[in-house]
Image: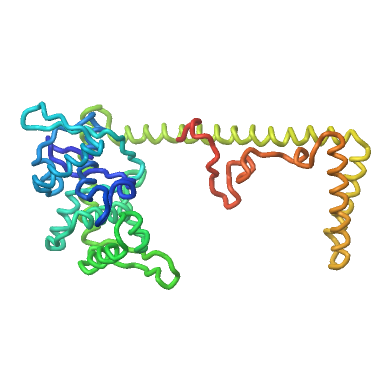
Amino acid sequence: MTEAEGSKIEYVDLPRGYFGKEFSGKGREKLSVKAVLMHGLISAYTAKSGGAFLTYDDFHDAFGLSSKTIAKWTGELETRGKIERDKSKKDYIKYTAKEKASRKSFIKYDKELLRVIDAIFGEPHFTPTEEIMLCNIVSIIIRKEENGEFKVGRYKAGYTGIQTQMNVSQSTARRMMKKFADLKIIILKESGKSKGLPNQYTLNSKLIKAWIEVLQNREAAKNEAIEKKSGVPEADRRAKAERKKAIQDADYRSDREHYYSVLGQKAEDTAYWYTSVARQHEEFKKIEAELSKLQIKLAKEKSDDEKAKLEEKELNLKVTRSIFLSKIGLSDEQLTPQYSCRKCNDTGYLPNGRICDCYPSDRGQP
């Protein structure tokens, strides 16, 4: 949430988790979308300064809610233990959110964006759910890059995905997307119906141009405020931050590589030690030599019948090896590295090249 020029509210960050956990949709015993908006606003203030002194006019300005709706849902939020209200200050109520809201993934409910849309498309009427959905789509399509520039992408979603994201019925998801498309706010770029994939949308070019201009102006005002406060030009501050981030990333990669190197080496050293113990016995060495010769023959053999015979011999030799190992107090498993993570074999990477999730979270992230 940002606050510009006193108490004027421009946007509120709503964690996406609200919509699966708190938002009910029609006919369910949870919170309405209006209550979710109010809870998000109070949570944003609480995260910033520990609480918010707000009047009913503030809620009305932010979300266009009536006094009756505000009274109903602030009371419900308090009853459910979501917020606390302190009425001791004259003309204001202090609201404090009792739950911390994650900012890792959020929908930006942006009143200025809705005003821009009204100006371009002739003030179409939207429900609160439609407003949130529009803000969600625009925030996904127009993203800020690390270098500060704004990039235009696409919104990829099927009706089932929208239904899950917003906790609405599939018919509501279809109705919303059709309405946005009919108004030409969003443009279908690629239909996913034939392949069972989600549709891909982009924005009206007028909206893209107007909204990027607003975002750039916001960024310039923010940078100017930072420069004024710190006395350091924003370009220098950003370059310093990028250097710091690059160092942190390098340190993280180094620590991660060292962690997996030590982990993998430990498993391999343990297996090597048990193998060296087994190889002190001539019988084991003889079985190993026979197995090695047999596996070479098997690799070269082209006849299916001969292969079947060799595979049977190989199996018998492996059984013989297992029996011998049990006599000396060892097992086949001990002779091969027993990695702590079976998904990545202590390399940190899955077979498809993606990073494994087994790295301990308490070792930090960049």
Residue 113 vs residue 168, the one in the foreground: 168
* Residue 65 locus on image (x, y percent): 12, 48
Residue 354, placed above or below residue 92: below
Q: What colouring style does the render use?
A: rainbow
Q: Looking at the figure, which quarter contains the N terminus? A: top left
Question: Which quadrant would residue 173 be assigned to in this image?
Answer: bottom left
Question: Which quadrant would residue 55 be assigned to in this image?
Answer: top left
Q: Residue furthest left?
A: 91
> What is the tally of numbered marks visible in this picture?
0
Q: Residue furthest bottom?
A: 194
Q: Is residue 130 left or right of residue 104?
A: left
Give the residue drawn at x 19%, y 52%: 113
Give the residue drawn at x 24%, y 33%: 46
Res. 8 in view: yes
* Residue 292 locus on image (x, y percent): 87, 49
Residue 151 vs residue 263, the one in the foreground: 263
* Residue 92 locus on image (x, y percent): 9, 32
Residue 235 vs residue 341, the one in the foreground: 341
* Residue 82 locus on image (x, y percent): 25, 37
Q: Is residue 291 left or right of residue 54?
A: right
Give the residue drawn at x 8%, y 45%: 67
